[in-house]
Image (cartoon, rainbow, N blue to C red):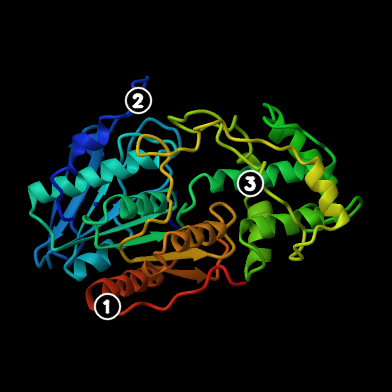
Amino acid sequence: TLCLSQGMALAHDDESSQRRDRPARPVPAYFVDQAKLPFDALPGLAARQYWGVQQGAGYRIEVPHNWNGKLVMWAHGFRGTGLELTVDNHPLRAFLLAGGYAWAASSYSRNDYDPGIGATDTHALTHRFMRMIGHPSRVYITGASMGGHVTAVMAEEWPRTYAGAMPVCGVLADFELFDFFYDFNAAAQTLSGVGKTFPYGADYLSTTVPATKAGLGVAGSPLPFPFALNANGQNFKSLVQLRSGGVRPLFDQGWLFWNAVAGDFLFGLGVGDGTLARGRGFVLQNSDVVYQFDTDRALSGAETVFNGMVQRVTAQRGARRGGLNFVPTTDGALRIPMLTLHTLGDLFVPFLMEQEYARRVARKGHSHNLVQRATRDYGHCAFTGQELAQTFTDLVKWVEGGVKPAGDDVRNP
């Protein structure tokens, strides 16, 4: 599965102009192991391979001998906080080469959750391709998870450079993702009765979480949380469902996978202090959220009590302002075709990302440029190669032939 990955040149659209406002602060000693950059051709697919380092970011480029003049950029996902910067081959590499497409991918010059760097470095690599190989007739941008965030940012920021965008399992609603992580943990603390307040401290996973799960499970049951739930546990599950994308197929499977198979993964996302890499302060916010346990908009007594008890937090002023030198916001100013793909049961980058982005695009009046598809799976980026290839093929038919693909109304249960 995939994990948490720029066209027509513009005179003002150069690398230096996108980097000039980066903050002057200590940067971790990121590095590229250049010995790992070379890669071999695929059997039966004659192509020229290029690799190197550009302004601290490693890259790979591959151009088939029968190049059709088109380029597909790849934006990779979250790499953690390690210092080594690594490059992915495009997950559709063989499919693209067989179709005559060139592709390129950057390591980015930083790790951590930094889609602004991902966007500027991938965009810079597009221009490097133009200098090295030539100007493509069309450039597509594709990416997964955090790379889906990168893809959406690039589509909105440089619509004259990219012809179409394909974010899959993407963080399309920027800070809303981190708000969901907080929702999960704050609700668990309130409903379990443990009542730990954020930030949760060093003993959260070792001490607080076991007590929290016990408080949401059925005492004396041979089945633990998340399989057997008491009344508060049922309300917790319902709240998570509604906050992650609403009533939908595959949520039950996702609930069990992300809380049992994946262990305490979702609880682990609550560990931290509410700030992000290169951030401007505390970014989490639930002060404007009305939590519910069911789809009836009228608050029940239990919902009223919960909303009065749950710990409320508010982002610091300016902390969510975004920008290419931080975590960019995706405001829905989508001027090129975008075809997205998202699994319904994913609780790491939940389906609410698609719903919120659809709302933002609609507010900007660009819904005609957005088609979204829901896939019945519970994994994060758990797509088959055939699904990805079909999605890209349909995007190309839309961009080049005017055949708008079918999709799903993600805001309709």
| Image quarter of residue 198 | top right
- Residue at 85%, 47% (x, y): give it: 305
Under mark 3, the amino acid is Leu
User: How many residues crowd around disc 3 within 10 Å: few (fewer than 14), some, or many (20 or more)?
Assistant: some
Among the two numbered marks 3 and 2 on one chain, the one whose residue lies closer to the N terminus = 2
Under mark 1, the amino acid is Gly
Numbered badge on residue 332? none
Q: Helix, strand or loop at disc 3?
A: helix
Q: Which residue is mark 2?
A: 23
Q: Which residue is mark 1?
A: 402
Q: Helix, strand or loop at disc 2?
A: loop
For the residues carrying marks 3 and 2, which lies nearer the camera in this image?
Answer: 2
Under mark 2, the amino acid is Pro
The answer to whether residue 230 of the structure is visible from this angle is no
Q: CA distance from mark 1 to mark 3?
A: 41 Å
Among the two numbered marks 1 and 2 on one chain, the one whose residue lies closer to the N terminus = 2
Image-based side of 149 in relation to 225, left or right: left
- Relative depth, front residue between 255 and 339: 339
Among the two numbered marks 1 and 3 on one chain, the one whose residue lies closer to the N terminus = 3
User: How many residues crowd around disc 2 within 10 Å: few (fewer than 14), some, or many (20 or more)?
Assistant: few
Q: Is residue 82 above or below residue 262?
A: above
- Residue at 44%, 48% (x, y): give it: 4
Q: Position of residue 301 (x, y in %)?
A: 88, 54
Q: Which residue is mark 3?
A: 266
